[in-house]
């Protein structure tokens, strides 16, 4: 029998962030249980992007993200930007005149909820591009630019029919791997231990956590005596919840990304994250359309698909790598590994992105060898995380970080630590409790949440 102050199930970005803040606040006997390598299941396969842009029925997600970004910027400053944080922003674009008002309204809502001011531009000299690297003198809020002529002048690589773009400024990307390694290194320096194994049981006594059972690689089951257990199991969160006798309100979506060598220079290396808002039809030649229509397995490729195709440059300035994401099928699935890769994913993602960036059509007949990876978005129905105590005394959760785990990890880990240690909680803490689903007023509001600003 061994013991620990806290046992954390999972060494993904949520688990190592929880360990970092628990040890930062003075705990020393923290054990992180992980079957594989830390940060290797999904945390190192994310888009690695961040934003404080969360239009919604209230400002709770914006408040969480604003604080998380403050913590990220602090780490960047302390480490000479080891985590390679930039502030290039997200550029949402639309070719539909009707979408311009929607972009304007979303920006106005986001500004009211704390994301920063809205600036509108009709002349090129009033718009300031974001710095390509580092934080620089990065702006916050967003810039709305209307009119195809002005947009073409500022962003000549976009579809010439683009009617409006919204450049969200407190956004960009970083190295998720470097962030996770830094958090884990710091936690281990303060006493946290990494244990290879699988959590197979949680023993209770008097309605409270008493010990955690871990099956190690040898098959031997070790019992770790503890009063605090943290479920940070990423895509396995639902299964870990069942060990506690809980059915957590979670669903999983498969999200993939494809990267390839964009050697023709269609997307400038200093470009922000590029996101096409509009529903789209994939660009096929007449001959291709005829062939696709003949087979039931491929005729869906001719249908209108939802918007949300997005891409960004990856790597150092001399790297040609482009990451492209287009996850148009988001029905709930059961997580399985290795990931199932749908047929045609790379081709579909490339063609969808070419609607926004017509220059990518030059790759259609000579598609570079793609690399595909990804993971599962574990989410609640309103796409807000679960952070805080569970019904079993001494059990806590930090999860449902659906596609925003890297950007939210610092604030989520800090909030989790505050719950465990009984510290004062920030104003946004109640918005992320599991117990919110016991509130009839909250349940009545769920329809107003929409998609939770999910890409």
Image: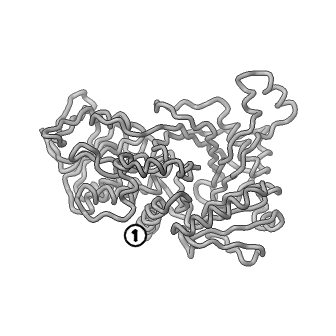
Element marked by disc 1: helix
Q: How many numbered callouts? A: 1
* Residue at 67% from the left image edge and 71% from the top image edge: 129
Residue 66 in view: yes
Q: Residue lying furthest bottom in this view? A: 125
- Quadrant location of the N terminus? top left
Q: Quadrant of residue 226?
A: top left
Q: Quadrant of residue 105?
A: bottom right
The location of residue 115, given as percent across then percent down, is 54, 67
Q: Quick check: 360 left or right of 10? A: right
Q: Quadrant of residue 168?
A: bottom right
* Residue at 31% from the left image edge and 36% from the top image edge: 246
The location of residue 215, given as percent across then percent down, is 25, 31
Q: Nearer the viewer, residue 314 or 233?
A: 233
Q: Quick check: 8 left or right of 75? A: left
Which residue in the structure is indicated by mark 1? Answer: 78
* Residue at 38% from the left image edge and 36% from the top image edge: 238
Label 1 crowd (10 A; few <14 / some 14-19 / many >=20): few
């Amino acid at each position: 029998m061994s013991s620990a102050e806290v046992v954390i199930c999972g060494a993904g970005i949520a688990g190592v962030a929880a360990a970092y803040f628990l040890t930062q606040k003075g705990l020393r006997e923290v054990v992180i249980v992980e079957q594989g390598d830390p940060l290797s299941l999904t945390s190192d396969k994310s888009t690695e992007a961040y934003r404080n842009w969360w239009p919604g029925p209230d400002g709770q997600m914006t408040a969480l993200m604003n604080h998380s970004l403050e913590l990220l910027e602090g780490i960047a400053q302390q480490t000479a930007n080891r985590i390679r944080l930039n502030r290039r922003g997200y550029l949402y674009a639309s070719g539909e005149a009707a979408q311009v008002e929607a972009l304007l309204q979303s920006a106005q809502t986001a500004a009211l909820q704390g994301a920063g001011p809205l600036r509108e531009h009709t002349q090129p000299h009033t718009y300031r591009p974001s710095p390509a690297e580092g934080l620089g003198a990065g702006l916050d809020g967003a810039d709305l630019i209307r009119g195809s002529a002005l947009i073409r002048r500022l962003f000549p690589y976009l579809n010439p029919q683009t009617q409006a773009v919204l450049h969200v400024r407190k956004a960009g990307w970083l190295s998720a791997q470097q962030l996770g390694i830094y958090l884990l290194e710091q936690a281990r320096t303060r006493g946290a231990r990494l244990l290879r194994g699988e959590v197979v049981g949680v023993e209770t006594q008097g309605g409270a956590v008493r010990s955690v059972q871990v099956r190690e690689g040898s098959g031997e089951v070790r019992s770790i005596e503890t009063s605090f257990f943290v479920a940070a199991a990423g895509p396995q969160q639902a299964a870990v919840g069942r060990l506690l006798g809980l059915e957590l309100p979670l669903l999983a979506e498969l999200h993939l990304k494809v990267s390839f060598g964009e050697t023709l220079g269609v997307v400038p290396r200093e470009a922000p994250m590029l996101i096409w808002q509009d529903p789209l039809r994939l660009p096929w030649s007449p001959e291709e359309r005829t062939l696709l229509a003949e087979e039931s397995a491929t005729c869906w490729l001719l249908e209108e698909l939802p918007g949300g195709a997005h891409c960004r440059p990856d790597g150092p300035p001399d790297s040609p790598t482009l990451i492209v994401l287009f996850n148009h099928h988001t029905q709930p699935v059961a997580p399985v590994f290795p990931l199932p890769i749908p047929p045609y994913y790379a081709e579909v993602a490339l063609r969808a992105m070419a609607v926004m960036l017509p220059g990518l059509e030059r790759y259609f007949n000579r598609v570079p060898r793609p690399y595909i990876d990804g993971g599962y978005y574990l989410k609640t129905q309103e796409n807000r995380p679960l952070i805080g105590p569970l019904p079993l005394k001494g059990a806590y959760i930090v999860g449902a970080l659906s596609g925003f785990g890297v950007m939210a990890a610092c604030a989520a880990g800090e909030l989790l630590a505050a719950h465990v240690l009984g510290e004062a909680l920030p104003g946004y803490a109640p918005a992320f409790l599991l117990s919110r689903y016991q509130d009839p007023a909250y349940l009545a509001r769920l329809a107003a949440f929409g998609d939770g600003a999910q890409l």
